[in-house]
Structure formats: C-alpha cells, structure tokens
Amino acid sequence: MSLILFGHPFSSYTQKALIALYADGTEFEYRTLDVENPGPFFADLKRFWPFGKFPVLVENARAIIETSVIIEHLQAHHRGPNEWIPEGELGRRVRFLDRFFDLYVMNTMQVAVANALRPGGTADAYGEERARERLNTAYDWLDSNLREPWAVGDRFTMADCAAAPSLFYADWVEEIGPKRPRLAAYRARLLAHPAVARAVDGGRPYRHYFPLGAPDRD
Ligand SMILES: N[C@@H](CCC(=O)N[C@@H](CS)C(=O)NCC(=O)O)C(=O)O
C-alpha cells in the first residue's frame, strides 16, 4: 500500500500535507511538480484532478483531494503518533480552525500573491486592499482566540498543519507585527516544530518564486 504525493515544496498547501506526513514519519513517494517546466508529473496530476491543483495524495490509484481530507485519510488509514482530528468538541474546534486558516488566512494571503502575478494592467487593487483588511481582521481574531502552545491547546493537530504555512506566508504579505504578540509567538513556535521546519526548509531553494519579494524574516 504505497502513498504518492503530488506537490511542490514551496506551495503552502503542499506544506500543510507534508507537515502531517513528516510529523507521523509516514513513508510516501514525493512527486515534485516542476512549475516552470510542467512535465509528465503535471499530466499525471491532471489525470487525477483536472483542476491541476495540488497537493493530491494517491493511494492504490485512488486520488485523495483537498488537504483537510488528505490529513483525515492519513489519520484513518496510516495512523501515526499524532491524532490530527480528535473526537468530540475538541475535534470540532480543530475543524473550525482548519477552515479558518485555509479560508481566512491562506486563501486571503493568496489574493495579494495572485494579484502580483497577473498580466500588466489587470491587477485588482481594490480586491487586494480588501484582502489585506481581512488578513488584519483574521490576525486580531487569532491573537485573542488561539490557545497555547498549539491552536487548540496541548495537542498538535490538523489546525496547526494549516496554521503553519498560512501564517508563514501571510506574514510576508501583511506583517503580523508587535501588535499581536500571541499570534507572533505562535508563528515562531510553529516554525520551530521539527515537521514544520522540515517542510519550510524544503521550500527555501524556491524562495525567489514569491512574487512580492521574499522578506528576510522567516
Ligand atoms: N483547497 C485546496 C487548495 C489547493 C491549492 O490551491 N493549491 C495551490 C498551491 S498552494 C495550487 O494548486 N495552485 C495552482 C493553481 O491554482 O493552479 C487544498 O486544501 O488542497
């Protein structure tokens, strides 16, 4: 029963799935997509998922799509030391925060990134301004509502897998800054987690891909 992951080391959503795989020590074959020279791996990926979005996990020729579902699949079929989505109320909080990081931080951060990549004259300044406002609202909310040391308290869960790449990159788009000391400390704790550090380090050689210019802070 072999697992194949299609993804790219600099991709925030790929990193979310990698963190779960690395933290559990789960073996998998990593098919790194070459985003500059789309080759056979891209064609394979599109056969599994015509949208061409990644990561996609493949097991026994079946594609598992969407990072939250990938992590749920890993917990169900390749259980490791971490319980990514606990039972009951805590699990519901994990799911909520996982949605929060994906929808209110990761995707919102990507608006500014996508805007910078648009062909000349088509940039949406109003849309980007709104996205930056939403990021600031998300930061303020997180600063007041996160537990410690991890998003839901003592356990490192799927919410933290989603939080790590979203906060890592969002801070490059719109700095979290000293006004949110709890959120800034959480981001630093995440980046020091061995599985997160490994996923982020894998993306370092591609840092120049970041269209807004990669800041020197981590
Ligand atoms: N909701 C998806 C998001 C996947 C996603 O947007 N991935 C980005 C890379 S970080 C992507 O595929 N971008 C290329 C594209 O949109 O064509 C998930 O959780 O897996």
Image: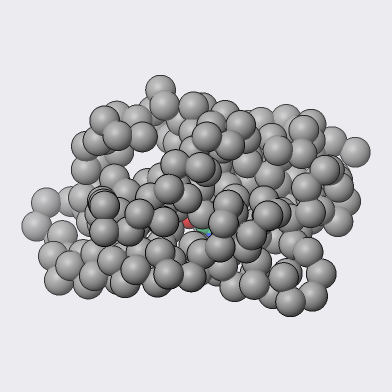
Q: Nearer the viewer, residue 63 or 19?
A: 19
Residue at point 63%, 46% (across, down): 17
> How was the colour assigned to the protein in this rendering?
one colour
Residue at point 72%, 70% (across, down): 90
Q: Nearer the viewer, residue 146 or 110?
A: 146
Above or below, 86 relative to 5:
below
Residue at point 15%, 60% (across, down): 122
Residue 8, percent from left and from top = 52, 36
Q: Residue furthest left?
A: 121
Residue 63, percent from left and from top = 73, 52
Residue 125, percent from left and from top = 13, 65
Q: Is residue 48 visible?
A: no
Residue 40, percent from left and from top = 58, 32
Q: Is residue 148 visible?
A: yes
**Residue 93 occupies quadrant:** bottom right
**Residue 148 occupies quadrant:** bottom right
